[in-house]
Each structure stands twice: as structure tokens, then as C-alpha cells.
Image (cartoon, rainbow, N blue to C red):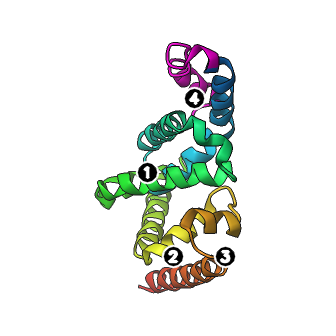
Amino acid sequence: MESSSHWERGWDVVLGSEQLPASAASTEAIDLSTLIHAYSALLFRVAHSILHNRSEAEDLVQDVFLRVLERQKDLPEVRNLRAWLIRITWNLALDRRRKIRPEQLDEPFAASLAAATVPADQALAETRQIAAVLNAIQRLPRPERHALLLSTIDELSITEISTILQRSESAVRALLFRARARLRQRIERGAKL
């Protein structure tokens, strides 16, 4: 992802005083600008973990901040802003992912994760391994897959994951345990083939 200044430059147009009432332009623009600066990288990682596509993830993050702009008056009522923003990002990314065939995103994503400084044959082997892991993750039951993906993003706590998934903390722990065990089993089984 590009630097945070990329995000700020992209939002200068949206945050201009023509878009906000004159009385709210200074304080609300600063608040939104602060949110963008503080959370855009995290929200990009959340979106990218689901969409596996850089430009789609960047577009989605912009959509999230547009929603925040639309609901700016509700911000003071939000208890956990980080979890709230992640939940919006998560839900939008899941909606967008449903509209895209998995093979459209996973192949290029796996190739992008392989080391660029290794010989081509080693990079191809790494890409195949990564694709196999991504495939195994996609085949997990949805609640397990979601808990697992969220647990890998910015070290989200069990409490934050339970808030995002709207499940109890003990349910999230159980989902993570089952997902990791099932994933380990599938990867080991695949390595033996």
C-alpha cells in the first residue's frame, strides 16, 4: 500500500469545505482526517486479506470512509471505533468477495506473496504452496475461516474479534482452535500427496 499521504491526498477533495457545512468543516474534517491517517493501513489489510487484490482493497477502504462521512454524526456514540471500522470493512469486503469468483483473486494474490528475489522455480513452488494454503483456508467452514482471518490481522484481540463477528469470546476461541487444527490437518494431508 502507498504511504498514508496517498490516502490523505485522495481525501482532500472529499474533505473540502464545499462538501461539509461551513460550521462543521474545521472540526469534523480534522476528525475524519485523523481517522483516515490512523486506520487506513489497518482497514486496507483487513480488506486485502479477504479480497486478495490491492486495487479492490484500496477502493473498499475509500468506501468505508465514505460511509463514515455519511454517519459522522453517529461517531461520538461508537464505543470501540477500531472494532466498528473493522466490522464495516469486513462486511463490505465479504459482500464484494461474494461477487467475485475465488479463482479470479487467489492466483495473482498467491504469486504476489512469493519472494521476488528467489529463482523462478523456487518462486513457482512457493506460489503453489501459498495457493494450496489459501485454498485450504477457503474450504474451512465460514465461521472458522472468518475467525482465523481476523486473528491474523494486526493481532486483533479475542474481544475485538468477538465484537466484529458478534459472537462470545469463548465461541471465538473455539472457532480459532478448530480452524487451526483443521487447517494444519489439511496442509499436512496435502503435503503427503
Q: Which numbered disc flags the more N-terminal residue, 2 or 3?
A: 2
For residue 168, side relative to residue 61 (left or right): right
Q: Which numbered marker is on residue 184?
A: none
Q: Mark 2 and mark 4 in contact (Cβ < 8 Å)?
A: no
The type of residue carrying mark 2 is Glu
Name the residue carrying label 4.
Answer: 7
For residue 184, side relative to residue 91 (left or right): right
Q: Which numbered disc flags the more N-terminal residue, 4 or 1?
A: 4
Residue 101 position within the rendered picture, expressed as x and y whole percent measured from the top left? 28, 58
The type of residue carrying mark 1 is Leu
Residue in the foreground of this view, choosing between 37 and 127? 37
Do we see residue 117 in this rendering? no
Residue at horizontal 63 percent and vertical 31 percent from the top: 32
Name the residue carrying label 2.
Answer: 144
> Disc 2 and disc 3: Cα gap in Å?
13 Å
Name the residue carrying label 1.
Answer: 92
> Disc 4 and disc 1: Cα gap in Å?
19 Å
